[in-house]
Each structure stands twice: as C-alpha cells, then as structure tokens.
Amino acid sequence: MIAVTSEFRGELSLVLPPEQLARAAQCLRAAPGLQFDFLSDISAVDRFPIEPRFEVNYHLLSIPLRQTVRLRVWLPGQDPVVSTVVPVWPTANWHEREIFDLFGIRFDGHPDLHRILMPDDWEGYPLRKDYPVEGFRT
C-alpha cells in the first residue's frame, strides 16, 4: 500500500498511490494505535513540467497520541483526480474545494465540489504554473 516513507524534522511522510488514499485515511483515523483524528491541512503543489505533475499533501495529527504524519499522493497532469476524504475528516470539505478551485484537482465523491474563491465563470486554475501571468483584462 505505501510506496515510499521518509522522515523530515520528526514528521513521518507516507507516499501512497491515489487509489489507496481513502482506505489509508480510514485506517489512520480508526485504528486504536494510530487515532489520527485531526486533519490540520491539505496542500497541493504543481511540479510542472515534471510528471506526475501534482502533489497533494494531507497533514494529520493524533491528538490523543500527540503524533503527526503527512500523507502524500502524486497525480498526473492530465485529469488529476483523487478520492475525497470528507467522510473521514469533514474539515476536508473546504480544503478540497480550494484545491479544486485553484489547481483543478478533482476529489471524487466530494459532496459539493464547486468553486469557493474564484467567480463561477472564471476560466482556468490560477495556481497552476502554466496559468497565464498577464492578468485579467477588463
């Protein structure tokens, strides 16, 4: 299930195949010896022109055990999709919507995936490295 593990400054990072994310999230939350009950953040990175292009990071905290872990999935530039973790951590709702809005990464199974920051008629995803930088013309 886990592709790569690493540790940096005391934080364990687990790289998972995207199709394993939902199952891993459920295990990390429910397992008595883990209890990662708090999702503090989800972030995305555009690694353009490198493939896989996108990296999505989930920063988790086990409050009872005072431990942290980061889950990382890599997604292709064409049709970047990963399962939602909203059923496991409801706070993921807005994090996933923000990443969708700014990077165009879709979260399969999300209960309400639509733009949260940009206007509904906005074209493109402004945090992608290939997004035009000339600005918005009026």
Image (cartoon, rainbow, N blue to C red):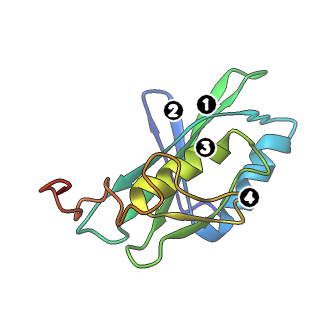
Real-space Cα distance between discs 2 and 1? 6 Å
Kindly indicate whether the residue at mark 4 contacts the one at mark 1 (C-beta within 8 angstroms): no
Of the residues under marks 1 and 3, which one precedes in the sequence?
A: 1
**Crowd class of label 2 (few under 14; some 14 to 19; many from 20; radius 10 Å):** few
Of the residues under marks 3 and 2, which one precedes in the sequence?
A: 2
The amino acid marked with disc number 3 is: Trp
Q: What residue did someone put label 4 on?
A: 111
Of the residues under marks 1 and 4, which one precedes in the sequence?
A: 1
Q: Residue at x 24, y 62 (%)?
A: 131
Of the residues under marks 3 and 4, which one precedes in the sequence?
A: 3
Q: Nearer the viewer, residue 4 or 127?
A: 127
Foreground label between 1 and 4:
4
Kindly indicate whether the residue at mark 1 contacts the one at mark 2 (C-beta within 8 angstroms): yes
Q: Is 125 on the left-hand or right-hand side of 137?
A: right
**Crowd class of label 3 (few under 14; some 14 to 19; many from 20; radius 10 Å):** some
Q: Is 4 drawn above or below residue 13 in the view shown?
A: below
On the question of residue 71 being in view, the answer is no
Kindly indicate whether the residue at mark 3 contacts the one at mark 1 (C-beta within 8 angstroms): no
**Crowd class of label 1 (few under 14; some 14 to 19; many from 20; radius 10 Å):** some
Q: In which quadrant is the C terminus drawn?
A: bottom left
Real-space Cα distance between discs 1 and 3? 21 Å
Q: Where is residue 20 in the image (x, y as percent from the top left)?
A: 67, 65
